[in-house]
Amino acid sequence: MGRPQASAVVIGSGFGGLAAAVRLAVRGYRVTVFEKLDKPGGRAYVFEQDGFRFDAGPTIVTAPFVLEELWQLCGRRLADDIELRPLMPFYRIRFADGSHFDYSGDDAAMKAEIARFDSGDVAGYEAFLAASSKLYDIGFDKLLTVSFDSLGKMVGTVPDLLTAQFYRSVHSLVAKYIKHPKLRMVFSFHPLLIGGNPFTATAVYALIAQLERRHGVHFAMGGTGSLVNGLVGLLEGQGGTLRCNAPVRRICVDDGRATGVELVSGERVDADVVVSNADAAATYRYLLPDVERRRWHERRLERVRYSMSLFVWYFGTDRQYPDVPHHMILLGPRYQALLDDIFERKVLADDFSLYLHRPTATDPSLAPPGCDAFYVLSPVPNLDGATDWALQAERYRSAIERHLESTVLPQLSAHVVSSRLLTPLDFRDRLWSVKGAAFSLEPVLTQTAWFRPHNRSEEVDGLYLVGAGTHPGAGLPGVISSAKVLDGVVPDP
């Protein structure tokens, strides 16, 4: 008889967990994924109601190649299962005075848009592209898929990072090259897509602008949930198993080594390798109750900086709004002051900046005929703030509705036929994010690379972490890349 097949369990079926499960299965592990919800996806869960399909979270695909690689590992092509539709423009950014900027990957169109605001900033834009290109080359080649579980690996990247001005914030880097205040907003908002404040997130994240420029912005037809289903199909094609409605109570540890998981039901499942795609802080705080933690102890988990949270209103209308593009960002009257309210003061302001998603602009199948599906997202303080969301949620939704009605969605209130809310309480209770932080740890310099929870746990042998709270961080490319990091630290079966 041969040796029994080595086993791995994965806690959580977000993009990081599913990507890790696929990679481990390809390498020969017998993989089981445990998901507490009734469907896979984690933050990429899909809500279906009243004939509408709403992607709960991620909506922007900026790095198709990280997905393509997973399909290739399984001997398939991404296009066999998923149609990625390129978007043009990437986003429409609307300012408080009603003017707007159409952001795309077309060089001539971008320069024409910039010149409408300040022709002198065209040269600055070119200089910014050169700086972000350098950051992209360093970030993807030397940061994204490397396991920073030793300080030496971090130190080795410092010369390159110094050359790329990583010590600046994203906004500071943009402001060095671009002078017009509105254009500074246009080119510095990207850290908000991964839970960061443009005024404090390290300039490394300026690589997002270059990522979009080189690879485009895409939408998965059928919604982001089609990517989740595609990854589940890959896993099952490799002999792996997904178990939903199966919340994990704790990670079992014997003699300092992870040996499996115990479910809330009482069932124990042994494994040679345990991978947690649960929120990194929650993994250490809740899933290792009997382990004395050396680095990620309770005091440290209280001290770290957590990302902002999100308020999301999903709604369907019984009419269409053809003038509204797929992705729109509606900036409020304040930029830095509002971000200070969210990230530093942690107070819920009366004004807001919004991301409006209209997927039916690209895929009408997500709504009944003649209807539109939307979600509108507002960055809000995490639960370190004093907002009582049980009392404030409907008031806040109503304020957003009035704002949308007076700007880009006329007569909205008369046409909403389906509605659903997601508040910081849902991130805490449903998605198990500590403090309701929508993107786990905030991406500041002192919480980047080696300074984040490591992909190979510092606390328990045989335990590995993927997802937004570990290296390299939040966003689809980040969490999928966190699974690739495991290839270098999880031993072969």
Image (spheres, rainbow, N blue to C red):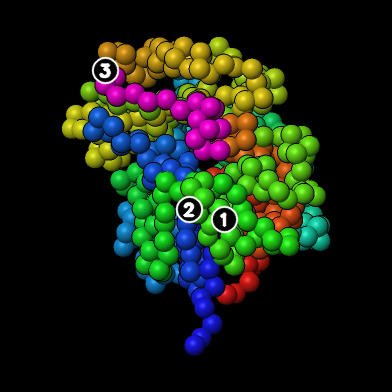
Distance from the alpha carbon under mark 1 to that under mark 2: 10 Å
Residues at circles 1 and 2 in contact by the CB criterion of under 8 Å: yes
Say which amino acid is labelled 1: Val
Residue 441: give x, y in percent of width and height: 66, 39
Give the total number of marks visible in the rendering: 3
User: Pointer 3: what residue?
Assistant: 415
Distance from the alpha carbon under mark 1 to that under mark 3: 48 Å
Q: Secondary structure at mark 3?
A: loop
The residue shown at (51%, 46%) is 264
Residue 30 vertical placement versus 187 (above, below): below
Nearest to viewer (mark 1 / mark 3): 1
Q: Which residues are magenta?
A: 415-432
Residue 248 vertical placement versus 401 (above, below): below
The answer to whether one can see residue 155 in this image is yes
Say which amino acid is labelled 3: His
Q: Is residue 468 left or right of residue 292?
A: left
Say which amino acid is labelled 2: Phe
User: Pointer 2: what residue?
Assistant: 34
Nearest to viewer (mark 1 / mark 2): 1
Sequence-first disc among 1 and 3: 1
The answer to whether one can see residue 468 in this image is no
Q: Secondary structure at mark 1?
A: strand
Q: Nearer the viewer, residue 204 or 110?
A: 204
Q: Secondary structure at mark 2?
A: strand
User: Pointer 1: what residue?
Assistant: 261
Nearest to viewer (mark 2 / mark 3): 2
The residue shown at (39%, 44%) is 38
Distance from the alpha carbon under mark 2 to that under mark 3: 39 Å
